[in-house]
Image: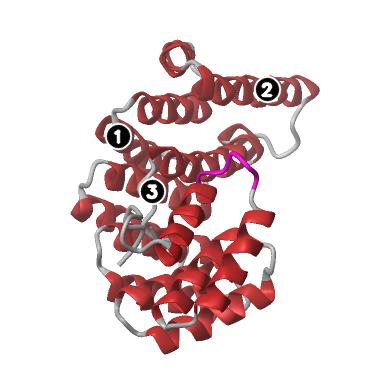
């Protein structure tokens, strides 16, 4: 299994939740109330802090009890909770297993939001990730492209659309997006790792190893870069180099991280090719 084609639902949802949290924090810090009140009163500040605490608690509940989190968030919306409440409700729907409903809510939130282009762009990107979860690739591309029109300098948005395109096996388009990300941040190890993986699927192993060497140089303890470079070494007929990368990846990754299983499956494929479960092409 490659870094860019993660099949585990847990990993896909984690990516979306991280993006959701970062944008929602921005919603709370730059909320419409702040725009309407240039010099907030002590009461307004206290209310904003209370909303921030309530949002944080809601997102924590999404992780442990998503149905209860949705009910709480929906009630909060009815009481005037605004954008943070709607955001948490959408996150809960995604966790429960309703990506289409989550995507639709996130799109509506972005459209109605009073926030700046960057915040609305990240909400649209989250909608795109939810559409991708539902394998609605055209809708995912539409919303993530709209996000990039609002915030074309945001490196993370280029990376996010690349991930979606890779999930849809549009490797060439994924490379294009990652190249745009790297134009804006040439030392972004994540983008280099992902582009190296996409190049591998395009059978461009020389380009893949070039990106992955840079990625490992920038982030030597990143297990994702080590996993992917090891795969490319194996495909290039360099088993010793593959073993070294995977050994470093296992040392760097937490024991319960999903990537540990991926690394071990690739080691089995190298050492016992006739009996191992296929890990990659």
Count of marks placed on residues: 3
Residue at x-position 50% and y-position 56%? 263
Q: Nearer the viewer, mark 1 or mark 2?
A: 1
Residue at x-position 41% and y-position 44%? 12
Residue carrying label 2: 53
Rendered view: 122 above or below 145: above
Question: Toward the viewer: 241 or 108?
Answer: 241
Label 2 secondary element? helix
Rendered view: 187 above or below 210: above
- Mark 2 or mark 3, which has the lower sequence index? 2
Instruction: Tell me which segment is drawn in magenta.
Output: 254-258
Is residue 70 rendered to the left or right of residue 169?
Answer: right
Q: Position of residue 164 (x, y in %)?
A: 33, 57
Residue carrying label 1: 99
Residue at x-position 54% and y-position 49%? 260
Q: From this viewpoint, is residue 122 visible?
A: yes
**Alpha-carbon span between mark 2 and mark 3:** 24 Å
Residue at x-position 35% and y-position 48%? 7
Quarter of the image that includes the C terminus: bottom left
Residue carrying label 3: 124
Is residue 267 rendered to the left or right of residue 145?
Answer: right
């Amino acid at each position: 299994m490659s870094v860019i084609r993660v099949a585990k639902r847990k990993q896909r949802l984690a990516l979306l939740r991280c993006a959701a949290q970062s944008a929602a924090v921005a919603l709370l810090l730059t909320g419409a109330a702040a725009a309407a009140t240039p010099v907030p009163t002590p009461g307004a500040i206290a209310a904003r802090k209370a909303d921030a605490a309530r949002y944080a608690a809601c997102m924590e509940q999404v992780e442990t009890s998503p149905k209860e989190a949705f009910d709480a968030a929906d009630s909060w919306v009815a009481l005037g909770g605004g954008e943070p409440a709607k955001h948490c409700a959408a996150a809960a729907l995604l966790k429960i297993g309703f990506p289409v409903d989550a995507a639709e809510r996130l799109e509506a939130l972005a459209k109605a939001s009073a926030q700046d282009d960057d915040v609305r762009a990240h909400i649209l990107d989250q909608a795109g990730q939810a559409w991708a979860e539902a394998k609605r690739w055209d809708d995912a591309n539409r919303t993530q492209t709209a996000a990039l029109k609002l915030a074309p300098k945001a490196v993370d948005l280029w990376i996010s659309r690349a991930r979606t395109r890779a999930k849809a096996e549009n490797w060439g388009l994924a490379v294009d997006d990652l190249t745009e990300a790297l134009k804006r941040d040439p030392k972004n190890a994540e983008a280099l790792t992902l582009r190296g993986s996409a190049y591998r699927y395009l059978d461009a192993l020389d380009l893949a190893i070039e990106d992955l060497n840079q990625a490992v140089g920038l982030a030597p303890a990143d297990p994702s870069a080590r996993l992917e470079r090891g795969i490319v070494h194996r495909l290039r007929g360099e088993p010793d180099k593959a073993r070294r990368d995977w050994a470093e990846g296992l040392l760097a990754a937490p024991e319960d991280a999903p990537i540990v299983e991926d690394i071990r499956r690739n080691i089995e494929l190298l050492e016992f090719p006739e009996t191992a479960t296929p890990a990659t092409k």
